[in-house]
Amino acid sequence: MRNLRLALAQINPTVGDIDGNVGRVTESIEQARAVGADLLAFPEMVVTGYMPEDLLLKPSFIERSIEGTRSLAPLTRGMTVVVGTVERDIDLFNAAVVLHDGEWIGSYRKRYLPNYGVFDENRYFMPARETPVFVRDGTVIGVSICEDIWYPGGPVEEQVIRGGAEIILNLSASPYHAGKAQARRRMLCTRAADNIAIVCYINLVGGQDEIVFDGASLVVDEQGQVVAEAEMFEEDFLVADVDLEGVFNARLHDPRLRKERALDQGEPATRMELPTREPAISVEGGASMTVATAVATKPELDHRSAPHVRDLVGEIYDALVLGTRDYVRKNRFEAVVLGLSGGVDSALCACLACDALGSKHVVGVSMPSPFTSGASKEDAEALARALGMRFYLLPVGDVLQAYQRVLEAPFTGRDPDVTEENLQARIRGNYLMALSNKFGWLVLTTGNKSELSVGYSTLYGDMAGGFSLLKDVYKTMVYQLALQRNRRAGQQPPIPERTLSRAPSAELRPDQTDQDTLPPYDVLDPILRLYVEEDRAAREIAELGYEETLVRRVVSMVDRSEYKRRQSPPGIKITPRALGKDRRLPITNRWRH
């Protein structure tokens, strides 16, 4: 029997914190040694954090990253460790470095560099041409990086056909969006079954600016069955014993790879030997780590092969919590502050912030104007009390009157309009920024994707802040998330029922509702998905059953509001195409659908 105990360290690095990231890797190496792991893998670019962006244009950053990686080699006596980092010769590469038995043996360099959506790897890296495999005790290991495994054929198939790889180890930094984990799981199972190989997929976890990495690392056997799975949105350490004889036996009975190898005209893959001089040392008496066994006929697996199952709304909620927590903590803020209007958006943001940071680190501010209803004031205070967060009441009426007195002369002869409405929003923005300056709190904005798409927001008012929790969350999803949060609370839901049932309103003029300006959200949101995320033309959208005049009005609102979105704070990506790096349109632009 050829067995290999492998470990996948699903950790949460911080971009640019090379010493800290190397320290986390070091801890995981010791943990792997304690459970007797033969092979330990880390996610893509774990040493640098993903993505360093233009830090990669700084030679000093590159050199320090390589030094940090090299410092790990002496720690690997008796085991093989594959770590994501950068590597250079005359060019710069996204690399998976193989450290073995105390030495830097070699590396795999990423071939397929994504350059779409939030990715821009062609800006920094050279794509590799070689596809090596690594041989440990007769077991052939094919290492690849993220995008390299997403396409049929390519590096993974070459490692199997030309190098005889039995284990495919994929180091990844795969950003989250709703439904991505399920699609990724299907793809990995297909790769394993098609190549009759064990696929070990190790993904980053944690938030980095707009992006959340969801983890959910996997071990898939040669039949395409998931045999071990790490948690989503949490750091985890996954251990699995894999039986390489199962791969050999499966290939004996399936002639596909033999035929492909016979027909292949390419050069054999470069083989790098990993001679084992010392056995991995296990803690006396065994470790407390449970182990999943990856064999063709699997015994009952431990809990790691069946992690907590989330419905899609719950999955999105957890992604928002993780993204919020990491943005705040990694940027070294102690507390956050946000406006509480009594509406569902700010209520959901408050819940997310409290779940991410703890209620003692969240400050809510009610800032009623002369048009704020009693229900809104009551619901804002009730929410803050239910969550246990600090709460301030700072009315805007007196300041609004002062503004109106100062502006009375230049406004003479002009009727009140949106100007006076925006004054109220900007006073609130000033209040929150004053608290931020005085106490060092990060201001959270509460606008949602529906509003930001069509420009139903006020520059330097409700858009003023440092982080936008709901920037990629449509209004209809806001309600679903709010209901999800209340259900999680059981008998004491924090969001008042009246907040969920009242018509949404900015309350900046008498008897105002959002639908005075916008279509109903259950009509608006599908149109926005088609236009913002799929780039459908107005005519195409109308042909799907929407009133054409309405569609053209929505499309025009989206197009005219690009200048606002360009000035909005970063927010968490949870859809396939978020407002930000995913969607890059010129502000000065006369193209119209």
Image (cartoon, rainbow, N blue to C red):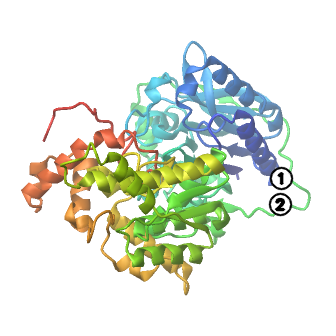
Q: Is residue 471 visible?
A: no
Q: Nearer the viewer, residue 217 or 349?
A: 349
Q: Position of residue 206 (x, y in %)?
A: 59, 50
Which residue lies at the image location 59% right of the left edge and 73% below the top edge? 387
According to the picture, the residue beneath numbered tag 2 turns out to be: 287
From the viewer's perspective, is residue 315 above or below residue 155? below
Above or below residue 4? Residue 89 is above
Residue 124 image offset from top left, x and y in percent = 50, 24
Q: How many marks?
A: 2
Q: Nearer the viewer, residue 474 or 291?
A: 474
Is tag 1's residue or tag 2's residue first in the polypeptide sequence?
1
Check the image and name the residue furthest to the bottom: 491
Query: Where is residue 449 drawn, in percent x and y?
Result: 35, 55
Badge 1 density bin: few <14, some 14–19, many ≥20, Cα 10 Å: some
Q: How many other residues sit within 10 Å of disc 2, few (<14), some (14-19) or many (≥20)?
A: some
Q: What whole-number distance in Å separates the C-alpha atoms at marks 1 and 2?
A: 6 Å
Badge 1 vs badge 2, beta-carbon distance below 8 Å: yes
Q: Position of residue 79 (x, y in %)?
A: 78, 41
> Based on the displayed image, in which of its 4 quarters is residue 356 positioned?
bottom right
Res 261 → quadrant: top left
- Give the side of residue 418 with respect to residue 209, left or right: left
The vertical placement of 154 against 331, above or below, is: above
Query: Residue at label 1?
Result: 34
Q: Horizontal placement of 161 versus 361: left or right? A: left
Q: Secondary structure at mark 1?
A: helix
**What amino acid is at disc 1?**
Ala
Badge 2 amino acid: Ala
Secondary element under disc 2, as helix, strand or loop, is loop
